[in-house]
């Protein structure tokens, strides 16, 4: 994918759920003449097809003045051939860089200028999609741009462009696989589950050796074969006129020539004749992990829904057979994961357990076998099956939070030739007999692939009889890669003839009408302040109770009580066991979670609107009738200890912890680990947790709600909480605000053999209430907050090929804040990347131009059309007002900040808050090859901090 996070989490959730959308097939002979309107129960669409074979899907949703555009090529890694893997993913990267009429970086520049979400994309086994949400007045621009990429792109790919993007893809692999615990697990599974040459037998990112060997001719041939209109689908979802949109689609796409017809795709299920056991000593893992994978079914198979249900019933919840046995009885892990993953031609069924420190994976396997036998003996619980179906319904509604999520899902439903209504109906139709049958057919006594990934030096923990897995880790050699040409994309290219003038960007339409959401407010009798935004687009309600305190209440000498309390509150009530609490919520289609943050506790939930009152009654019970179960506390402590170990395996989390320890100092509670230390976790007892809960006060609390409930309904549901939770005077501890260091210094944490170095450069900075906070956010847009439009990305990634992703920004809380740059870079360019990043920060204010100002103002002002689309965004507005004390009209004030921003103001803000001579430079990487080199950054010899950080665990 183009960015670290996929643009549409909602779409991913929708795929996993197999829930409703619609992409009904249309007869091509009739499609060119007239649209065929088809109406799904939940997401109505129109579909048609151009004469060149391009399939087009429209979904009109006028809830917000935004529109999502998704161009999906029906090509993924499964269309590649052995020896030429990774092409589909490489193309996803290349597609964003240039096209004949957009020009180099033109798509990113246009996205920023029009206030788009930023062009993004993803690649899977079967599909590559390109997606973005824009204000509705920019729809014609996006259709023009997507057509330019599909039909007028390949001439812009040159040898230097290809060489540079190969480095970016390598950085993505290092970040996602080589520099992560368990990062090679999926690759090992694929190579052993599927036969050699099977289209799913290699990972989507491919082989780096294959990418290195790829020639320009290979790339051109791949484009001509697969990037054709008749192998693509265009989805437009949101607020638009379908007749006008169709005219634009025909204008810009119709003349792109049809390509060779793609071959028919047929199921190719994995053929595994015997079980295989593989093991790997993982340089990053701190805990042993066992993954069992069986062949499954392809998308749309009659058994798909039953397999999904089986894996949920086996693992989800405290009374599920595998979780109950391994977590509660054997106490060898804190969770059991399970999933059925169906793709276009094959699928897999998977169980995964990360054991506690020192756990022998043979013990894990024996307990899994025992749990499966117990499931077969006891059969399927009818009530549990109904809860799965209710959760599926709620999960589907939750996935519809954005037009981008809907658009991405529609493209996938088109690929799989399924309809969402039928998929949801399939889940609802699953019977206990179906579940038992698929267990016998696909799991019981069937061959599987078992992978044991264990910490380096602990091979004895691997499953008995395991063979050493083939894991390819690219050696990092200083100076091994040739320098890339930062101006590679600027070469003049030959234009493809067109019947229309494509060189001029289309005009914008009428400006969207953006209205801030209407907020209601109320006060409960006990002092809790309540706010809400009514939104009845889907029958869901999202809510949050925020109570001041959190980690600020922790004892600096014995941290972790706030986190432990929150975790324990999720584990039952005085009336209900943990399993009974989970099941009560599932039956309502609800999810509720208690968490502790740095400055406050949060109880966050989502529920079907018809069950809002019943859900809040359970929340009231969780808060006012805690279980205080010593047995649960005994189970919880090893889980937290395992989380501490997992933190030590994640380079990005290590960098964050080093920064906190150095920046906040010994006297500030936020320099402590939120989870606590191994010693404090062991020492904390129930009395400590009871004392922590006694600090929760209604007068320090806010309740906010967004969704299909009005003010009367919300306050009525809170009546019990108001009556039963008495107010008390509680003062939240105050700490002195950390200050930037007097001089810059480099702090190095050694991870021997790291393929990447994690960079975090920053200093304490603005709080959320500071009047300079939002001007600072605006000033940072062109530096590191504007995604692919930012200088950091354009120079470190697009120009030098040093990284897969980089960004900078203000992280503000109520009591303190930070400004920081974050990136993961190729290990052998650590000094070069650090120097370039530092110089970009240092020079930003003095080089900020009038064009930068124009882009910043346009991007931030026009993006307000997208600002309130999702429930999460609306909840964020209420959070800013309630938790951070912003005025009710802060959104209008921020709009004025953008309009009045000046070059001189940006320069002054940069000079004051982005001072590279008063920063903390954290680097996590391979000390043997990189630490000494960093003295060249000019801040003296780096300070090794492994021991200092170890003292905080």
Image (cartoon, rainbow, N blue to C red):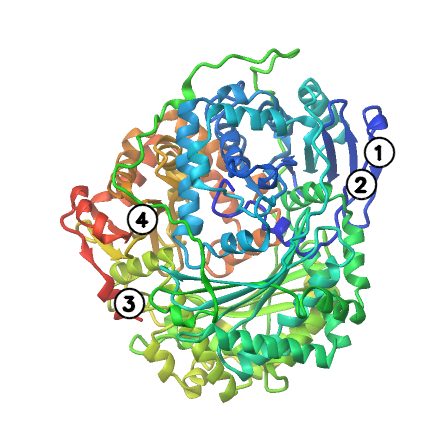
In this view, the residue in front, 91 or 13, is: 91
- The single residue placed furthest to the left in the displayed view is 940
In this view, the residue in front, 474 or 769, is: 474
- Front label number (1 vs 3): 1
Residue depicted at 67% across the width and 76% down the height? 583
Q: Mark 1 points at which residue?
A: 36
Determine whether 88 is above or below 918 in the image: above
Label 1 element class: strand
Determine whether 877 is above or below 690 in the image: above
- The reply to whether discs 2 and 1 touch (Cβ–Cβ < 8 Å) is yes
Q: How far apart are marks 4 and 2 (CA)?
A: 48 Å
Q: Mark 2 points at which residue?
A: 24
Q: Name the residue under label 4.
A: 759
Q: Mark 3 points at which residue?
A: 668
Mark 4, Cα crowd under 10 Å, few <14 / some 14-19 / many 20+, is: many
Mark 1, Cα crowd under 10 Å, few <14 / some 14-19 / many 20+, is: some
Q: How far apart are marks 3 and 4 (CA)?
A: 23 Å
Task: Answer with mark 4 or mark 2, whichever residue precedes in sequence.
Answer: 2
Q: Residue 423 carries which label?
A: none
């Amino acid at each position: 994918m183009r960015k670290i996070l996929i643009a549409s989490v909602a779409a991913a959730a929708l795929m996993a759920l197999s829930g409703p959308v619609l992409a009904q097939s249309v007869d091509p002979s009739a499609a060119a003449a007239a649209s065929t309107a088809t109406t799904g129960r939940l997401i109505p669409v129109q579909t048609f097809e151009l004469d060149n074979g391009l399939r087009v899907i429209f979904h009109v949703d006028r809830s917000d003045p935004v529109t999502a555009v998704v161009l999906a090529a029906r090509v993924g890694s499964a269309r590649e051939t052995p020896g030429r893997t990774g092409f589909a993913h490489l193309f996803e990267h290349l597609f964003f860089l240039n096209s004949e009429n957009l020009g180099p970086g033109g798509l990113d520049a246009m996205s920023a200028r029009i206030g788009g979400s930023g062009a993004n994309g993803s690649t899977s086994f079967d599909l590559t999609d390109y997606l973005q949400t824009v204000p509705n007045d920019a729809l014609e621009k996006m259709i023009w741009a997507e057509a330019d990429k599909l039909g007028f792109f390949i001439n812009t790919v040159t040898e230097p462009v290809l060489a540079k993007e190969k480095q970016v893809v390598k950085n993505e692999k290092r970040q996602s696989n080589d520099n992560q615990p368990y990062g090679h697990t999926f690759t090992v599974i694929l190579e052993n589950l599927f036969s050699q040459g099977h289209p799913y037998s290699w990972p989507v990112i491919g082989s780096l050796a294959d990418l290195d060997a790829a020639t320009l001719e290979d790339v051109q041939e791949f484009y001509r074969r697969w990037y054709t209109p008749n192998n693509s689908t265009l989805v437009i979802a949101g607020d638009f006129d379908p007749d006008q949109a169709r005219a634009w689609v025909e204008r810009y796409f119709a003349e792109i020539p049809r390509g060779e017809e793609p071959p028919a795709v047929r199921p190719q299920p994995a053929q595994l004749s015997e079980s295989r056991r593989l093991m790997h000593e993982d340089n990053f893992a701190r805990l042993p992990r066992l993954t069992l994978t069986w062949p499954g079914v392809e998308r749309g198979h009659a058994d798909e829904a039953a397999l999904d249900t089986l894996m949920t019933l086996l693992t989800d919840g405290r009374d599920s057979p595998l979780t109950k046995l391994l977590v509660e009885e054997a106490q060898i892990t804190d969770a059991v994961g399970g999933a059925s993953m169906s793709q276009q031609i094959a699928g897999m069924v998977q169980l995964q357990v990360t054991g506690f420190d020192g756990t022998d994976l043979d013990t894990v396997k024996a307990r899994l076998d025992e749990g499966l036998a117990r499931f077969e003996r006891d059969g399927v619980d009818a009530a549990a099956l109904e809860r799965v179906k209710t959760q599926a319904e709620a999960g589907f509604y939750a996935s519809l939070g954005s037009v981008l999520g809907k658009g991405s899902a529609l493209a996938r439903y088109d690929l799989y030739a399924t309809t969402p209504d039928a998929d949801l109906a399939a889940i609802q139709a699953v019977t206990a007999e179906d579940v038992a049958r698929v267990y016998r057919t696909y799991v019981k006594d069937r061959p599987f692939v078992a992978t044991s990934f264990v910490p380096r030096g602990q091979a004895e923990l691997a499953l008995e009889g395991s063979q050493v897995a083939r894991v390819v880790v690219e050696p990092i050699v200083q100076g091994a890669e040739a320098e890339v040409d930062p101006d590679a994309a600027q070469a003049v290219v030959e234009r493809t003839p067109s019947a229309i003038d494509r060189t001029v960007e289309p005009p914008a339409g009428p400006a969207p009408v953006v209205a801030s959401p209407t907020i209601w407010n109320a006060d409960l009798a006990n002092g809790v302040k309540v706010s809400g935004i009514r939104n009845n687009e889907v029958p869901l309600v999202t809510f949050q109770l925020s109570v001041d305190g959190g980690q600020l209440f922790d004892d600096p000498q014995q941290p972790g009580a706030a986190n432990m309390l929150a975790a324990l509150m999720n584990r039952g009530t005085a009336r209900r066991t943990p399993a009974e609490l989970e099941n009560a919520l599932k039956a309502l289609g609800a999810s509720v979670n208690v968490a502790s943050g740095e400055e406050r506790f949060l109880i966050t939930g989502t529920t079907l609107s018809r069950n809002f009152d019943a859900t809040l009654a359970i929340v009231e019970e969780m808060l006012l009738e805690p279980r205080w179960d010593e047995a649960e506390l005994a189970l919880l402590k090893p889980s937290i200890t395992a989380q501490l170990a997992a933190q030590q395996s994640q380079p990005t989390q290590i960098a964050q912890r080093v920064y906190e320890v150095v920046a906040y100092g010994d006297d500030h509670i936020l320099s402590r680990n939120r989870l606590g230390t191994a010693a404090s976790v062991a020492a904390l007892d129930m009395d400590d947790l009871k004392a922590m809960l006694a600090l929760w006060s209604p007068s320090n609390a806010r309740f906010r709600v967004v969704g299909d409930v009005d003010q009367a309904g919300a306050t009525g549901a809170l009546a019990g909480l108001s009556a039963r939770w008495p107010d008390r005077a509680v003062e939240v501890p105050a700490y002195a605000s950390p200050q930037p260091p007097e001089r810059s210094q480099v702090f190095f944490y050694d991870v021997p053999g790291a393929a990447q170095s994690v960079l975090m450069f920053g200093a304490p900075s603005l709080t959320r209430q500071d009047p300079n906070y939002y001007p600072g956010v605006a000033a940072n847009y062109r530096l590191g907050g504007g995604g692919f439009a930012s200088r950091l990305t354009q120079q470190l990634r697009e120009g030098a090929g040093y990284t897969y992703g980089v960004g900078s920004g203000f992280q503000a809380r109520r009591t303190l804040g930070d400004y920081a740059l974050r990136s993961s870079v190729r290990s052998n360019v650590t000094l070069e990347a650090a120097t370039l990043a530092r110089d970009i920060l240092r020079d930003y204010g003095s080089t900020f131009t009038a064009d930068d100002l124009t882009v910043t103002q346009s991007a931030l002002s026009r993006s307000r059309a997208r600002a309130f689309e999702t429930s999460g965004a609306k909840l964020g507005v209420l959070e800013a007002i309630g938790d951070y004390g912003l005025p009710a009209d802060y959104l209008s004030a921020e709009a004025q900040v953008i309009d009045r921003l000046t070059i001189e103001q940006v320069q002054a803000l940069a000079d004051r808050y982005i001072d590279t001579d008063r920063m903390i430079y954290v680097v996590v990487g391979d000390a043997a090859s990189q630490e000494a080199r960093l003295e060249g950054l000019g801040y003296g010899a780096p300070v090794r901090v492994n021991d200092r950080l170890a003292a905080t665990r």
